[in-house]
Image: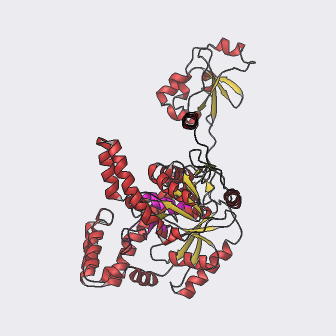
Amino acid sequence: MRHHLATALLAATSALVPPTAPRRSKALRARDAGVAHKIPIIEGEAVDPASDPSRPRWLYAPSKVPNASHWDVVLDARSPSEFEEDRMLGALSTPVLDDDERAEVGTLYASNSFQARVRGASLVANRLAHILQDDRIATLPRDARILVYCWRGGDRSGSLAHALSRIGWHVALLEGGYKAYRKLVREALYEDREGLLLRNCVAIGGATGSGKGLILDALSARGAQVVDLEGLASHRGSILGAMPDEKQPTQKHFESRLYNALKALDPSKPTFVELESAKIGRLDVPRPIFRRLIEAPVVEVQVPVESRVKWIREGYSHFEDGAEGTRQLRRLLDFCAPTAGKKTVERWNELIDAQDWDAFVTDMLESHYDVGYQRSRARDRKNAGVSQEEPYVVDMASTRDEDVSKCAAQILERFARTKLRVAVHKPARKPLTVMHASLQEGESDGVSADELTNENVVKFVREEVSDQEVRSRRPAVPRRLHAIDARRLQERRLVGGLFFEFGAVRTASSDRDAPRR
């Protein structure tokens, strides 16, 4: 009886006391400690407090655009269409839900969130098995570093990161996901107030068909820094510049490509960039980058028209097939009618019908492209508000390899010395500053002259101040002064009040007979 009672009490006591976690062996602790010590932690990484300490998952919150080279592999857990639109350069597409599955789960979530989670978990589990069987992941070493992200750093990337971290790899989750990455890219390109990107730029200019792309290739082969905007945009820049069988990237992915190319530059060395317009195909060059390109010193490449025609025909030979390529050319020429004129487009079509391709290309260059190039250069300089030193002119005999190589050597010799930002802004004429002392107005931060019309200027300046008050207060300096651009004072001779010009005190009446400056 006593034996059974003791057994019952022991069982009851055991039920009330929670079981203690089994101690991990010294070997396991030593193994994990060694791995944690061997794998370096980069800036922005921190252990996820919600993860298992024995197999921790990390959170990565970078202050700058993350660099894929810091990781052995970067995994994009978003759907294929999201990956196609834009991604971190170098990332692998490992979707835990494809486009149809994502739409299915999203639709179900609107009506029943719990059932959507059940369905989503089953689909994700099936996808994880295929991802782990991928040789690009399954063959990673034990101490590999893996970065995972999805749209916002939520369930999709979290499920993949959890599975990989349980295996034992060093796995980090990008906090904020792709949205955070995209925000950092935009800030780097559009808010670069210090001019850290493309600081020392040399623009390679020249009319259409001058072989500027060939020169960039030759400069790169000689070890110079080159940024190929047309290559990044997958477009040759003109209305006929679409590359056959290759579509342009999205604007977002073009900006990712552009940032990745610019961040690798050494600002102490010149960077050669082809002089482009603000738009390449349907893609826009970020405004700060385009402004630096406009401000840069220009190398103007001059090539004979015959060589330009030959080079253009080689690069656009798909338009001469007499079939779909030629029909596409005719459709594109219709877009030139507003600028070139309908009669000019009709003349071009007649040359195409006669298959006189040399005459067609020559006519397009002389009547459309060359005129448009000069017009766009003048417009861009005016819009940017800068003036430049005269371009460095290089005469290239042809687009043959030996001539291109000679031209590249001449350019490198000219720009061998580091020369930062040689463009000179137009000097603004120093305005005549007129200081108005008010005895009646309250404290004010002043008014911008650009905000004032002539009527407002007169109203702003006119005061009821007598000559006696002016003479009595002449030795004293008024406390409240308002700066006004005198060039805006069209009614100056009709205004009464007190003026201070370059430290001299005068009334409007005494200024009436003074000579104009």
Left or right of residue 260, residue 150 in this image: left
Left or right of residue 175, residue 195 in this image: right
Location of residue 158 with respect to 226 vertically, above or below? above
Q: Nearer the viewer, residue 110 or 310?
A: 110
The image's colouring method is secondary structure
| Image quadrant occupied by the C terminus | top right
- Can residue 250 be spotted in the picture? no
- Can residue 113 be spotted in the picture? yes
Q: Which residues are magenta?
A: 232-259
Number of labels in the image equals: 0
Q: Main secondary structure of the magenta part?
A: loop
Q: In the displayed orientation, state which residue is furthest to the front.
A: 1
Location of residue 497 with respect to 355 vertically, above or below? above
Q: Nearer the viewer, residue 136 or 339?
A: 136
Give the x, y percent position of residue 5: 55, 33
Give the x, y percent position of residue 440: 60, 14
Give the x, y percent position of residue 317: 36, 82
